[in-house]
Structures are given as structure tokens and as C-alpha cells.
Amino acid sequence: MSNSKSEELSSDIKYTLPEEDWMDVPVRMKKGMYCHGANENSLITVGFPNPRQWSSSETNWKLPENWQDIVLTGMAERLEKYRSFHIFMDICVRCGACADKCHFFLGTGDPKNMPVLRAELLRSIYRREFTTAGKLFGKFAGARELNEEVLREWWYYFFQCTECRRCSVFCPYGIDTAEITMIARELLNLLGLNIEWIAGPVANCYMKGNHLGLEPHTITSSVEFLTDEIEELTGIKIEPTFNRKGAEILFVTPSGDLFADPGTYTCMGYLMLFHELGLDYTWSTYASEGGNFGSFTSNEMGKRLNSKIYAEAKRLGVKWILGGECGHMWRVLNQYMDTWNGPADFLEVPVSPITGTVFENASSTKMVHISEFTADLLKHDRLEIAPSRNDHYKVTYHDSCNTSRGMGLLEEPRYIIKKVCNNFFEMPEHTIREKTFCCGSGSGLNASENMEMRLRGGFPRANAVKYVKNKYDVDMLACICAIDRAALTTIMDYWVPGVRVIGVTELLANAMKMKGENNRQTDLRGDPLLGAEGGDAEEESEDV
Amino acid sequence: MPVKGMGLRDIMAKEKGNILDGWYNLILETYPPESRVFLKKKSDQFANPIGHTISASIEGILEGLLCNGAQEQMAVMLSDIIRIMAIQDCSPSDTILLILLLKRTLRDTTRGYVKGDQLFSELLAFEDKIDRLTLLSFDIFMKCREDVFNLKVNELKRSTFMIAKRLKSEGAETL
Ligand code: SF4
Ligand code: SF4
């Protein structure tokens, strides 16, 4: 019903919309579908061009006078620099295979959210300015002029793409619309047209080392508060170290894990796991952010923010880096970090100090995913596990777009879940793994003012969760991404009430028997364990 | 084709498929033309979640009307479709349009049958039931909008969860 108009009721009811070419349909920016514009100060902090106070909901965006030149020059530079971008501009045959694969199209019914049309928004300008056919034949060759209307359309629709890459899985030519969105956002960024939900965290991260802008003492006290919670639950006192030189491993995770529900429980899980293993590791209060909102503005900014992780690893003299549960952090790590700031020759190829496993896949970046690390521990039976301590949950698993399509991490989280849970149910095959549906809030779009957009984008994912809820009574959606933990909780509350969201490491920590622990009566978030009244929930378990 | 002795209920049972198709198509025509083609595809429920939800939900509503379903059951089925409308730039009156579209389809489909007074008054009585749905739809729509508002509040609370928890543990009275 996206375009129905109630006024139509009062006169002769007209049920249909005019059948126009997409280029002739002017952009109508709908409330709830876009974010606030970037603040001047956020841009100044990192030296981004054209900072100014402007409002995305007003018509005057206070563009610099030569804005068209800036965009076209920027486009020419990127066509030269990124071969992939140039190819993506040329080779689409409009076969339509990607058209109905985007969660935003599926959730909005808006044709400009079809990946092929999203790319056409940019491609039409490319044709007009950089191809002979476009210059000669204009609209007949799919070309059009760059004007303010087009710019608004770009801004509206390129901040309605979560860079999830689902469309690229179905494209016979491998066109990656996410990469096109990245370039489009770079071009918008040249005009100061970013969104504050991204620009603010970028400025914070640049100044303080994390998106939330937490000072070192806040980070240490937050982690210590979590250790108090763990002590209350297990009777075990954990004393993690911060900025410790000479530690074997540096641990980096998204800062949201330290503060936001339910990420904090995942964070407790990390602390418990590392303590149980006696791992020689340290937290850093400077490289205190695994995520990288810089990568949602420009390659260059992504690189600048990412570099602090290596700089800190070097300063502390660690051997390798272990990373927590995050989505785009791993996309950046797997696809860009090595080119941007690698190879990290001053570090060693990661070796698990517990099992001796050499993580060859990380031999260049020197950074290992917590799920790879944990799955290896379980494979070698290095943890005592009572899966029945998760029997009060019926669990399904959401593949984060970034860890699945961005790095191919499909089996490890599932391996862990199956080891630590007795009740695990997969969602339908074409909604998981490489074909997973996005949460609808990724790539820096998890703001509050665009809630309707997020709910629409999250609908295809929720629809699949609803299916397993109805079929198997699933009540927990597991994931390995901080944005998922925050955003999917909201998506579930609206579309599938009764399903909560949980990190895989939280599930692990629920089931992990720690040496010297109390007889646990509840799980990490205080839910009573099944059979806990009897006092010995885990005794009834059978290890898998 | 009018058949002597057929009541409205029989006619509707016979024409159920046509009524549903008609209603569904009218709803889809409120979407842009490029999207309509896709939404009309009867592909599986995961590849076309909106199309599937709309068609499953309107079928449930019609069946509920035919067998005098309880208000709560009708609310569940209406809720599936209105939950989508509530976040798709629709106004409360658009949800009323949804139900009016059913009325229109119903009249179009049964026109050929309704000759005598008896059927006509049955149709009017049935339309009364449909009218009651409009009121219910309005309430559901408002509830969904309230849910959206609460989602924002709850998200904010969750993002500052630790601060609240710490203050509590440090003895603060409220937060
Ligand atoms: S990358 Fe994801 S959000 Fe962007 S167009 Fe493709 S499917 Fe849609
Ligand atoms: S699938 Fe690839 S080639 Fe086909 S329309 Fe989409 S982007 Fe173009």
C-alpha cells in the first residue's frame, strides 16, 4: 500500500498509479525513511569537505556552488582508480536477476530499491558524462543530467542500501551493488552530504578510539562492572588487563558490546571464556572499537580508523589479534584491511595457545575471529560443555551479511551452536548462509529517525524467523554481529514478538562449565535454567 | 451465473477464488507498476514476503467473515497485513481503504447473482460485518504506530543499558 492515498476516497476512487518511466518519477523523501544530515562539527573533526549545518528534511541543502564539478571530478577519479567500479558501470545487461533480491525492495515495493535501478541512479549520470552514446542520445541511451533532483535521489536511495551484497550473489556478472553504493556515498561525502548517525561515530572514533566516544576509564570500569556480574553468577572473580604491553594477544570488539543490551552478555561471554582458558591477552582502551563506520563514508576514512588497531598491536608488542563478534568489522578485515594497512609483518601468524592450531587463513592480517577460535577449542574438546544449560531456549541462527557474504564464515558459528545447544533449528535454505537476508539496519543505518525504513528492510528476515517460530517454537535468534544484536531485537519486537536475540559467545558461556564455579541457577541474563529448581541443571545434561 | 436457491454464503464460497483475486489485485494496484509485476508472482513466501503475507492474510479475513470468526481471530489476521501498512507510509484512512476494496470486489463479483430482495438484504448484512472490520483495522493501525514509537524508546534504553544497571547497583533510586 506504499503509495495509496486516503484523499482518493473522497472523490472517485482511483486505485492505480501512473505508469511512468522510473526516471520521470520524482523522488519523494518520506519521513521515517531517511536520517538526519551530518553535523558540521563531525565533519570538521576528521577534515571532511564542505562541512556546514544543513537539514536533510529541508529543500535547501546549501550545496557549494560548483557541486556538479565536484561530483563529476570525483566520479572521474574513481572510475580511474577502481577498475571494479568502471566495469560495474558498463557491464550490466539489465537481466533483472538481482531485482527482487534486495530486502529493501522486498520490504518497500519501491522499484528504486531494486538493485539494478539503484545502480542505474548513478549509471545514468555515468552514461551522460562519460560515454559517447549517452552524450549523443541522452535518455534513449539511459542517460540523464546531474541536477539537484538526482542528487536528492542518490542521497535518499544510497542511504537505503545496507551494502549487504545479497544482490551480487544472484548477478551472473558478479556486479556488486554494495560497491556502487560505497562509491556513491563517497561522492555524496565530497559535498558534505553524510548522515549524522555515521559521521558522529566516525568523529568519535577518530578522537577517542571508539564510536561511542568512551574515555579509557569508562571502558575499564565498564568491563570491571561486567566482571562483578560474572562473579555474582559464577562465584569466580575475573581480572582482565588493559593496555598491557607484552601480552600475547590483543582483543578487539565493537564498543557496543560494553554498553548495549543484549551485547553486554556476549561481552561477559568473552571474559568468561578467556579466563577459563587462562589466555594471555589484553584489552586496549585506545583500539577500543572493532567496528568501522569510516568504511561507510570513504575508503580513505575506513583506512584511517582501521589503522589504529595495528598501531596499538605494535605499541603493545602483541603476537596477534583476536576479534569479537561484529559484522562490518570482519568485512573490513577480510576484504580491505590487508590492502589498506597490511601486511602486518610485525605480528606473528596466529597460533592458538590452547590447541596449537595455526590460523593460516589469517597469516597476512594476523587477526582471528572469535568463532574460528572457539570452534577450534570445541573441536579439540578443550572446554567442558553442558548444552542442557541452554535447554530453555529454542535457537535459530542469523548469518550476518558481512561474516557470511563478506568473509565466508558459515560453518564455525553453527558448529559452536550445535555443540552448546540441544535445540537448534535452521531457517529456510534460501534465507540463510550466502543468501541470508540483511537485518535492514547495517552500514550505519541503525538510527532511530529512519525506523520505518529499518522495519521494512528487516521484514524479509523477520518473515523467515516467524516461520521457524511458528513451526518449532523458536524463541532465540543467535548471531555474531553487534549491529544485529541491537537492531534485530527491535525488528523482532515489531514483526515476531517473543523472539529475542543472543550472541553465539553468550550461548557458549551459558553452557561452559568453569573450574570452581557455583552451582548456576540462571543463565547470563538471569533467566532460570530448566531444572534449576532441583539445583543441578547441568547434571542432567549429556554432552554432544 | 445466478443459480436459483443459492444464498449469499453459497455464492461467496463458490466465488471465493475470484473475490480473493479481485481484492488482491486492487491492493496491488496501489503499488508502483514495476513492483506490481513482482508482487503478483505467486512465488514462495520467503522470496515474496509482502505478496505472500497480503494474500494469506486476506484469505484468512474472508474465511473469518464467511464462518463468523471471533473478533480476536479476525484481529490476528488483519494485524498481519496492517502491520505492513503501518510502516509503509500509509495513513489510518488507508487501512479503511483496504476494507473498502473488499467491499468493492464483493459487489463486483456478486453483481450477477443479486437479483432478488433476499440476496440483496443478505449482502447488506454481510457488508455490515465488513464495516465492523474497518473499526477494528483502525484500532490495529493505531496500535502498530504506538509499537513503532515504543521501539525507538526501547532501543534508546537498551543502548544505555549498562549506565542504568550501574546506577541501580550503585543505589540510585530511579532511571
Ligand atoms: S547491497 Fe543489499 S541493500 Fe544494497 S542493493 Fe544489494 S541487496 Fe539491496
Ligand atoms: S543481475 Fe547483474 S546484470 Fe542483471 S540486472 Fe542485476 S546487476 Fe545487472
Image: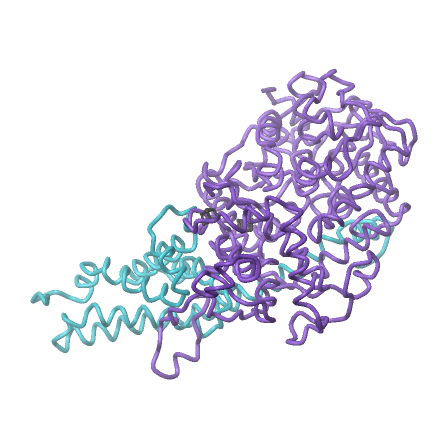
Chain colours: A purple, B cyan
Q: Quadrant of the C terminus of chain B?
A: bottom right
A93 on left or right of A530: left
B152 left or right, relative to B8: right
* Residue drawn at the location 50% of the way across and 61% of the way down: A134
Occupied quadrant, residue B118 = bottom left
* Above/below status of A474 relative to A369: below
Q: Position of residue B150 (x, y in %)?
A: 63, 62
Who is closer to the viewer here, B57 or A321?
A: A321
Give coordinates of residue A108: x percent, y percent: 49, 59
Q: Is residue A469 left or right of residue A52?
A: left
Q: Is residue B101 above or below residue A500?
A: below
Q: Residue at the spot x=78%, y=49% of the render?
A: B162
Q: Nearer the viewer, residue A347 or B123?
A: A347
The number of discs equals 0
Q: Is residue B127 left or right of residue A478?
A: left
The percent coordinates of residue B15 (x first, y second) are 20, 61
Quadrant the N terminus of chain B occupies: bottom left
Outermost residue, bottom direction? A11
B42 vs A290: above or below: below
Residue at position x 41%, y 61% in the image:
B78
Question: Where does residue A267 sit, x and y in percent of width and height?
Answer: 75, 38
In depth, the one of A417 and A512 nearer the eye is: A417
Figure quadrant of residue A20: bottom left
Q: Which residue sits furthest left?
A: B4
